[in-house]
Image (cartoon, rainbow, N blue to C red):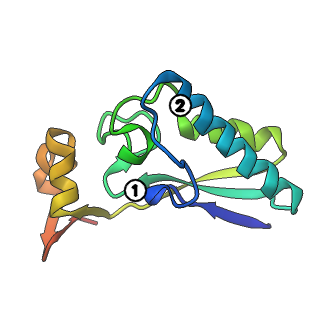
Amino acid sequence: MRAVWITTNWGLDWPSRPVKVLSDRYIQQKELCYILDELQSVGINTVFFQARIRGEVFYSSRYEPWAAVLSHGQEPGYDPLAFAIEECHKRGMECHAWMVTIPLGNKKHVASLGSQSVTKRMKDICVPYKSEYFLNP
């Protein structure tokens, strides 16, 4: 296995900017394809795609909101995880969802998610500790 992680937290590896208008989603998709092409060219055969970051996700979920870095918390017009899997497979690469499972974020971040935050909807499975929130393992 020759693997890499594609970090989506704060757009470190991808995406470079959130979807604001429909054409932005195509820019995001092209950026991801470029990254995958580069990885393929150096022999990478496995990608760990960060699909969940601190209470926000890169796939449609009834439990948590879309990632702000992806689309300001709105539906981006496509499923980024499904897109990543499909594009990896086109290049003969495996794709695994990498999920940050327990941290939910600090108080400011959780507040920014509003009523969509799991801390508001399912308080009994969340643990506040100092200035952070965590899912209760």
Residue bearing the label numbered 2? 24
Residue 124 appears in which quarter of the rendering? bottom left
Q: Residue at x 61, y 29 (%)?
A: 26
* Label disc, if present, on residue 53 of the rendered structure: 1
Specify which label sits upstream in the sequence, 2 or 1.
2
- In what quadrant of the picture does the N terminus appear? bottom right
**Which of these two is toward me, 102 or 106?**
106
Please say if 137 is above or below 71.
Answer: below
Q: Secondary structure at mark 1?
A: strand
Please say if 78 is above or below 1.
Answer: above
The residue carrying pointer 1 sits among few (fewer than 14), some (14 to 19) or many (20 or more) residues within 10 Å by Cα, namely many
Q: How much space separates mark 2 and mark 1, taking CA atoms? A: 21 Å
Q: Residue at x 42, y 33 (%)?
A: 60
Q: Pinpoint residue 117: horizontal percent, then vertical percent.
A: 20, 46
Three-letter code, disc 2: Asp
Please say if 23 is above or below 90.
Answer: above
**Which of these two is toward me, 46 or 8?**
8
Three-letter code, disc 1: Ile
> Is 131 left or right of 40, judged from the image as shown?
left
Residue 135 makes an appearance in the image:
no
Q: Pinpoint residue 106: horizontal percent, then vertical percent.
A: 21, 65
